[in-house]
Structure formats: structure tokens, C-alpha cells
Image (cartoon, rainbow, N blue to C red):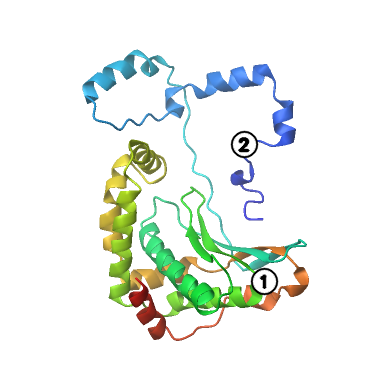
Amino acid sequence: VLYAGHPYANDPNGTLETVTRLTVEDLKRFHQQVMETSRLLLVIVGDINADAVRTRVEATLGKLPRGTYKDTPVPPLVFTAPSLNVTPKNLPTNYVRGVYAAPPPGSPDIYPLRVANSILQALVFQEVREKRALSYAPEAFLGSGGANTGGIYVTAVDANQAVDVMLKQINLLRRQEVNSAVTDATAQDFLTTYYLGQETNAAQAGSLAQAELLSGGWNVAGEFIDRIRAVTPGDVRRVASMYMRSLQFVVLGDPAKIDRRIFLSGGAPTDLLTNNQQLTTHR
């Protein structure tokens, strides 16, 4: 639904039809094409001498042909209105995902949006699970692709009530500013989870590679915490208003139990003060 007509509609794992058609010559041609340094990125993390590594790379991978590959950014996703796609499934619960178009990892807006998404995750967990017991694991998520997305996910018997509550939490962020204690606490959470996620050499190499390929340069990986700490409540409200809209909903479940008006409404605003206090206490 999201990627219809977009390059991301192509599954890099292939399909039964495409894989069945492959020949040995296809594989040889692809291998020769991809083994060009213009298509390759080498990232090395470890307690090793850089000059020694450079010498070995020059004697091996450095001898590969350069090639003429030039990276072409994929077009961003654009959703101008909310939508709802329901696939009938005879299931005891309904599976719901609502997706919005998010900025790419190289955008300055990705940092306040990550903070906004973290706050939204705490809000939907409180309101959907803790207060109403509508779902075990409601989620707010934000991706890291070139054509990026964010959104909400929930599995619930009463999908209408769960989605209505989640949309109202989005509207809280869009219409009113959270207090600075919330953004400060969120930045502190990121500090902990970020360094926990960087404990292995492999994780550090992955972060450097992603920054080089999608964020404008490998050195951006080291700026993450400072940029998160610089996010203000005004930034959170701005990016929530700009990006958390026109959600594209996909539902697996009983179409007769899905109220289209709720899914396409965007939710109604409610008082933010109480939620702020609860969120600060929760953290």
C-alpha cells in the first residue's frame, strides 16, 4: 500500500517469480557489476593500526575497478490525505498499522522527530495499555530508510477505541507543547539506549555506515546525542504537526468492526497537562 509505484516496492530478497528466472549467467554478471569500489563501502572498527589496514586494503579490495556508479536518492513518500485499507482476516484480534511520511535520516528534522516519537510511545503505552488494557504492546515507531516512514501499530479486539486513543495522543503533540522536563528526560533515555546500542564493534560499524550512506557523512554518527539534547518542546510540536499527519492505515481483521470515520479523522484534541505530568512521573 505504501510503496505502490515506488522503488521500495521491489523486495531485495526477491520473489518466487524473479528468483525462479535467474540463471548462472545472471549471477556472474551481477557479481562482476557489484564488485566495483564505486558501489562498495568498507567500514572497519577495532583496536588496530589504521596505516596497516590501509596497506592491506590497497593490496586487496583497492585493486578492484572503480566503475561509474553514482548513488541516486530514492524519491520521498508523499501522503496528502489519510487512507484506510482493510484486508479481511478471520482472526481473534485486529492488526493495525498507521504510517506517515517521515524525513530521511540526513534531515535536521529527524532528531526532534525521534524525540517526538519517543514521547508518543510513552503516551500510547500509558493510554492504551496501562489505563484501558486495550492492547498488550501498542507501538509508535520511526524508521531510518531513505524514503522514510513513522507511525503507530496496535493489535486489539476493539481496534476503533485503540486507534482513537492513539490518534488523540498524536494530536496532543501536534496542538500543544510538552514541558521541558519531558524533552530533557527523553534525551536522557536516548543517552542510555544509544550507548547500550554501541557496545559492540559491529554496532558501531553499522552506525558509521548508515551515517555515511544516508546522513551526509560518517562523522554525523558522533553528533547524535548532542543533536538530541538540543531538541526543544517547540521543535517537538513543530515536527509532530508537520509529519504526523495523513496516516495510511492498513488493517488485517474484520471489516465490519472497523469504523472508517475514526481511522480517517485524525483524532480529537484533549488536555495535555495531565498527560505531561503522568509522562514525567512514568519516566
Q: What residue type is labelled 2?
A: Asn
Which dot marks residue 157?
A: 1
Q: Which residue is drawn at 63% across and 41% down?
A: 10
Q: Is residue 234 above or below residue 207?
A: below
Left or right of residue 16, residue 69 in this image: left
The residue tagged with tag 2: helix, strand or loop? loop
User: In the picture, residue 112 is in which quadrant?
Assistant: bottom left
Read off the residue under disc 2.
13
Q: Is residue 256 above or below residue 56?
A: below
Position of residue 86 measured from the top left corner of the image (x, y, whole percent): 72, 64
**CA distance for labels 1 and 2:** 33 Å
The residue shown at (48%, 70%) is 125
Q: Position of residue 77 (x, y in %)?
A: 55, 55
**Amino acid type, callout 1:** Val
Q: Where is residue 232 in the image (x, y as percent from the top left)?
A: 30, 69
Location of residue 31 with respect to 144 vertically, above or below: above
Q: In which quarter of the image is the N terminus?
A: bottom right
Callout 1–callout 2 Cβ contact below 8 Å:
no
Q: 153 and 240: which one is in front?
A: 153
